[in-house]
Amino acid sequence: MTTCTIQCHLKYKIVQTTEFVFQIQAAHHPDQSIIEEQLTFNPPIAWREFQDSSQQNRHIRLHIEPCDAFEINYNATVERHPVMDADLQQNLNEVAVSDLPDEVLPYLLPSRYCNSDLLVEMANRSFGWMKLGYSRVKAIEQWIYNHIFYVSGSSDQFTTATDVLIQRAGVCRDFAHLGIALCRALGIPARMVVGYVEIEKFLPDFHAIFEAYLEGGWVLFDPTRLAPVENLIRIGTGMDAGEVAFSTFYGEIELITIEPIITDQGGRERY
């Protein structure tokens, strides 16, 4: 097990009265345990936490009036539990649709950013002939890594999986969307996961990967290969990025600072 310390700092200018929903807290999930955590706001403000009905993602809701600087600080100590042994993962089979749990079925459907219904022909042509199971999802991950370039600023809030496939460029959320869409096109349930993780090449930011449902349960994959999946501290899980945004707001704001920093016990900073 690995213990990590999270120090997430967000700073905004609030131009007009705004309703915020944040998703920055570590999730209550079997893969990790929250040892302690603290959430503070400057200036101090009333807020409340709620969980969504499907994934029990933790949301912070607040209402704030215009100001030049509004800051959020989330500090936590989280213990990451070991994921399934790699040798065991390699032997996992896919699960027939008839045998999928009810709560997993929705992750076969197309969604806002993962338009899997448009990728069925391509997915079957490229991966339909492969042995079913973990190795096929791993082949999807490898294909994306080989064929999609990681280019900051190459996508926006409207970019879908098919857009990424056409332009052959994107950022972590786009890589994840394409992986999810290709899995769903093959009848493999898949969903997005966001969290804190070490990425040494870039400035601090949140990271998005995906997980596929196989016979052993949900298994994580990262087509960017920017960080080992077992290092991720999970924040949220959803159909696609529309369900796991770190910030959703209704009003006019300017984001000034985003610093989601994570440090392991050895003192090495991980973003």
Image (tube, grey):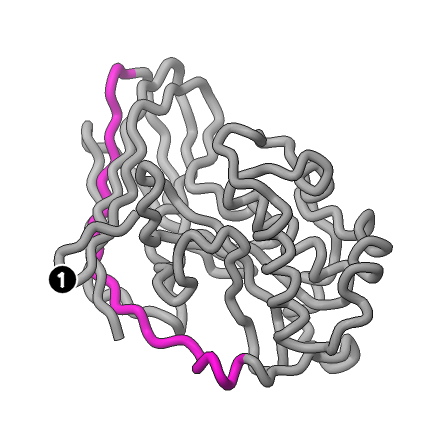
Tell me which residue sits at (50%, 55%) in the image: 209
Residue 68 is inside the magenta segment: yes
Residue 175 in picture, x, y percent from top left: 58, 48
User: Residue at position x 61%, y 82% from top?
Assistant: 92
Mark 1: which secondary structure?
Answer: loop
Quarter location, residue 131: bottom right
Instruction: Give the answer, above or below, for where 68 lies relative to 159.
Output: above
Farthest residue, direction right: 121
Query: Would residue 71 be counted in the magenta stretch?
Result: yes
The crowding category of the residue bearing disc 1, from other C-alpha atoms within 10 Å (few below 14, some 14 to 19, many at least 20), is few
Query: What residue do we see at 20% from left, 54% from top?
Result: 263
* 82 lies above or below 175: below
Does 111 sit above or below residue 219?
above
177 vs 70, nearest the viewer: 177
Kindly identify the amino acid type of the residue bearing the numbered disc 1: Gly
Q: Is residue 37 something that shows in the picture?
A: no
* Residue indicated by mark 1: 266
Residues in magenta, as a range: 67-89
